[in-house]
Image (tube, rainbow, N blue to C red):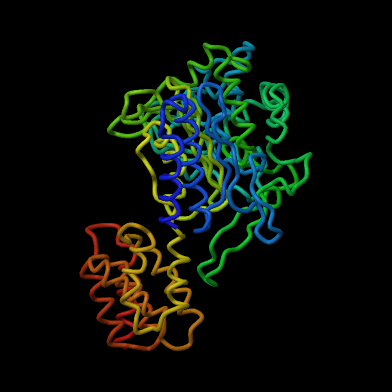
Amino acid sequence: MKTHLIAIILFTQLVFGVNTLFGQEKQSIEELKVKIDAYLNNSVANGYSGSVLVAKKGEILLSKGYGWANREQKIPITASTVFNIGSVTKQFTAAAILKLAEQGKLKTSDRINQYYSQASDDKKDITIHQLLTHTSGVSSKTGGFRYDEATKEQFLKEFFDSKLDSKPGTKHQYANANYIMLTAIIESISKQDYTTFLKENFWEPLKMNHTGYKSISFNSEQIAHGYYFNYTEGVWKDWGITQEHLTYNNNHWYSIGKGDIYSTTEDLYKWHLALQNNKVLSKKSLKMIETPHVAENDEESSHYGYGWAIFKSKRGTKIVTHNGSNGIYFANFIRYIEDDVVVIVLSNAILNRDSEDVSWNVGKMVFNSNYIPKPITKLSYELVYDFIRTNKLEDANKLPVFLKEHLNSKFTDKAVFNRIGFKRIAKEKNPAWGLELLKLNVKLFPNDGNLWDSLGDGYFEYGQKENAIKAFNKALELKPDNNCHWCNNSQEKIESLKN
């Protein structure tokens, strides 16, 4: 696979390396397209699948799909394939608020009690600006699981009854509930439901025909199925499409406004052009959206605008971006403002961290002709199962080397062996790979008390009393100064084994 990639790059250098035959601009564009295409095609072999669009100065350099939208039916991903875009949704919610402000129907300085008289004393002075910038003080835990049913009234009650993590306006803390509340305000002021407002003001005028929230008016085969790796069985599973998980009624108030909009790379590029050219929002509104209002971290290396994160590139240029995921799909939308470059990546399966960095790697290739990223690696959980299926139990100690070779980096994820180990123990009648993985985990990470507690549970399951007591004692030796979440289990198990 690596040899194939190198061969393609060498080929492009030979073909496009003579400036007298080709113009410099054409040469660089063609070489870039081949490099990006090679990077993504080589990643497909390891399970990557997604749609990628790259544009510069209004010209689309690459717009293409990779891998399968539906693995069972062998439907390939194309530039027109529809994905769940996760929290990239927030930019549409923020834009809707600014549109209402342009219409003179609200101000970002408005307080929440102007719209909801039932607002509790600690929340009545929260402003729309604070909701937009995640500085309301609302906890990230407020609200329920995105696909559980909840009425608007239920959400509002939970929001106003919840305990604030900080005083409004004092601290940035990303919380989905902020954007759900903004959605409630949008509906209250516009007298329209959220989807209708976005359609009439943004999507329909821009002919974003494959962008929406719940209902679809096109062939469902255009929607990419989401996939996840089931580490109980060691196989990839089809999660289906988002519309199968959202409620069919209007009780979607754990999901709406903060995530779960669907779109395509093509539609999102139309949105980028519309923002850039002030087709749907004024210059003043766009400036407010892209202003770095509040620092996202202590280092102040990144800031939050209205539905976008803002920071500087290593070249000192402005980047406006947002990513999103529902745990199945992953999306990233990056706009290099001064360079007039946009990179949009939507995918329907999350592998290792490098699968979430595709958009950034593509961006690096745009600005650095010498940069060639390694292909996306196969999911670490899947690699463990690959090893188990092709090796004997006595070769377990070779697994870390196997993983390092296939991950292109040192294996550092403590959760992988723990999760697979417990699932294997539940299926295996006698000690085998499940227990062996837990033993191997404490060899790799000997100073983690939680892993020793897990190993103790493994020994306990198989009645290996002395080994279990040793493991639990080691877990207690390594307990932290506070918040030891495994200590009670270790102590209780030791007491039960001594009796």
Look at the picture and state if 451 lies above or below 225. Answer: below
Q: Position of residue 37 (x, y in %)?
A: 51, 44
State the residue in front, 146 or 286. Answer: 286
Q: Is residue 224 visible?
A: yes
* In this rendering, position of residue 58 left or right of residue 452: right
Quadrant for the N terminus, please: bottom left
Please tell me in which quadrant of the rendered image residue 425 appears.
bottom left
Q: Closer to the camera, 307 or 491?
A: 307
Instruction: From this view, report whether residue 1 is shown above or below residue 433.
Output: above
Query: How many numbered circles are shown?
Result: 0
**Looking at the picture, how far across and down is residue 455, in whole percent?**
33, 76
109 lies above or below 33: above
Using the rendered view, name the quadrant where residue 470 is placed. Answer: bottom left
Picture coordinates of residue 239, whole percent (x, y): 63, 57
Residue 265's x, y, as percent? 60, 36
The residue furthest front is 20
Judge left or right: residue 373 versus residue 491: right
Identify the residue at horizontal 48%, vertical 74% (top origin): 423
Residue 122 visible? The answer is no
| Residue for point 71% across, 21% down | 205
Q: Residue 117: which quarter of the image? A: top right
In the rendered image, the quadrant that contains the C terminus is: bottom left
